[in-house]
Amino acid sequence: MQEPEAGTTAEPELGFRDRGPAEGTAGPPGANKVPEVTVWFWVVKVLTTGAGETASDYLARTLGPVPAGCIGLAGLAALLTLQFRAPRYSVWTYWSAIVMVSVFGTMAADVVHVVAGVPYAVSTVGLSVALAAILMVWYASEGTLSIHSIRTRRRESFYWATVLTTFALGTAVGDLTAGTLHLGYFSSGVAFAAFIAVPAIAGRFLGLNAVAAFWWAYILTRPLGASFADWMGVPTTRHGLGWGTGPVTLALLVPIVVLINHLAVSQRDTPSKGRRAHAAD
């Protein structure tokens, strides 16, 4: 594959091109703050959703919901501060922030249910409305929802607000199907694995907008990873494998660290550099 000419946009591996208004333009000044969408993006994303789910459950059961929530909020604030201060995409900073978003997003959805007593069906609807509102305001303000255009502080703020909401929504949806609808964690994971293939198929064969397909798949990675992680961690009395949330969290963190280190060394998901690496394959 030849390297794209200057000013053009290459289609990332197993990713989606920006087909919004900003396509084919240089965009606002500054470096893109999020990674290229490659197969590694989706693998690490699913692993972080699982690790965030079980880490949140482990901390809540060990320390209690309030102390765990304070730790999660502090960690999230610290890492998002580093992310916003970074001048360009940094592999370790970005993915560490994603892990903490996963942990805190789970806590937020669980606290609303456990502490406030809000049913998962209600929180699912509420978070869906919140997500739709964020996306509409983002698009009205910027004219695009593409992650290939996160080059300004405002767009980055919209991006992380969307990401945090998708994690909380995915947690609520996963618990809704597994518990309220009595599908169980494994069956829920299988169902979400099937659903996540829909945007890829629709984008390739039915002409679904690439940015819409991306966010559809992104939202579904949360209940997908969390459902299988819960299935491995919960006791057999809850139709799980009974491995424990602590051990499952550690088991998931190992491949996460290995893959992030690989991306940091190879720079395969670094904007522009990642494209040159694919062109050389």
Image (cartoon, rainbow, N blue to C red):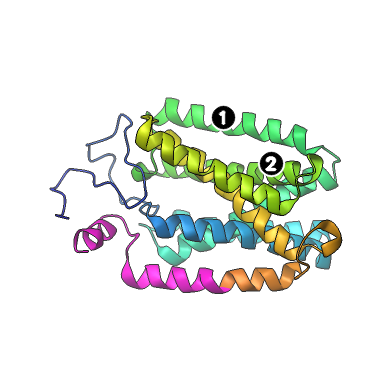
Callout in the foreground (2, 1): 2
Residue at image coords 40%, 62%: 90
Query: From which residue to which does the magenta span run?
Result: 254-281
Q: 102 or 249, which lies in front?
A: 249
Task: Relative to 144, say whether 26 is above or below.
Answer: below
Q: In which quarter of the view is residue 28 placed?
A: top left
Task: Relative to 17, say whether 125 is above or below.
Answer: above
Give the SS element for disc 1. helix
Q: In which quarter of the view is residue 142 placed?
A: top left
Give percent across and percent down for residue 256: 52, 68
Give the SS element for disc 2. helix
Asked if the stretch drawn in magenta spans residue 84, the answer is: no
Residue bearing the label numbered 1: 132
Side of 107 where 116 appears, left or right: right
Determine crowd level at label 2: few under 14, some 14-19, many 20+ residues with C-alpha closer than 10 A: many
Residue at image coords 71%, 64%: 232
Residue bearing the label numbered 2: 173
Which quarter of the rendered picture does the N terminus lie within?
A: bottom left
- For marks 2 and 1 on the same chain, the one whose residue lies earlier in the sequence: 1
Determine crowd level at label 1: few under 14, some 14-19, many 20+ residues with C-alpha closer than 10 A: some
Side of 231 where 49 appears, left or right: left
Residue 161 seen in the current view: no
Residue at image coords 68%, 47%: 188
Asked if the stretch drawn in magenta spans residue 280, the answer is: yes
Give percent across and percent down for residue 162: 54, 41
